[in-house]
Amino acid sequence: MLFPSVLAALAIGTTMESGASGINKTMKILALEKEVPGVTADQFPPHLQAEARRVWELYKVGIIREMYFRQKKTEAVLVLECASVAEAREALSTLPLVREKLIDFELIPLVPYPGLERLFSF
């Protein structure tokens, strides 16, 4: 029997890999938008509809899992699920604002917090 998380990943077409400890899901990657020097606000509007469309496409296939803006800046904060940082960078490169070099992203791979193991060590 497959676990619900495996079934969900299969349903959205995300990558599942078999490793030494069983099945490894894709990793979560935090993507923080960075300003590109010299870019002005008037350069964005012609690309915003295409940007929203591409973000929606990446969301539908399970690559972009969460989308936010910083509270005091109009900069995106995305949570992605990809097999690697390289795959996340490749997916983000398909965004029109990235392709036009109007924005860039810092990518931070995330791993599960191991500190709770201390509760179970005797």
Image: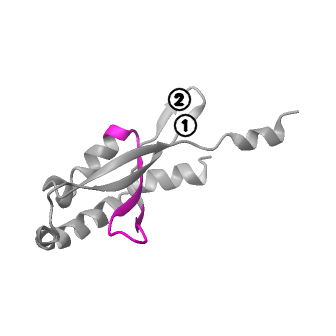
Residue designated by label 2: 19
What residue sits 31% from the left and 59% below the top?
58
Q: Residues within 10 Å of mark 1 (few under 14, many from 20)?
A: few
Mark 1 near mark 2, Cβ–Cβ under 8 Å? yes
Amino acid type, residue under disc 2 in the picture: Gly
Around disc 2, counting alpha carbons within 10 Å, would you say few (fewer than 14), some (14 to 19), or many (20 or more)? few
Segment tinted magenta in the rendering: 66-86
Q: Which residue: 45% across, 50% down?
A: 10
**What residue do we see at 56% from left, 52% from top?**
5
Residue 77 on the magenta span: yes
Q: Quadrant of the C terminus?
A: top right
Quadrant in which residue 62 is drawn:
bottom left
Q: Where is 94 relative to 59, above or below?
A: above
Any part of residue 26 in sight: no
The answer to whether residue 76 is above or below residue 45 is above
**Residue 90, position as x, y percentages in the image:** 26, 44
- As drawn, which residue projects farthest toward the right? 122
Residue 23: mark in rendering: 1
Secondary element at tag 2 = strand
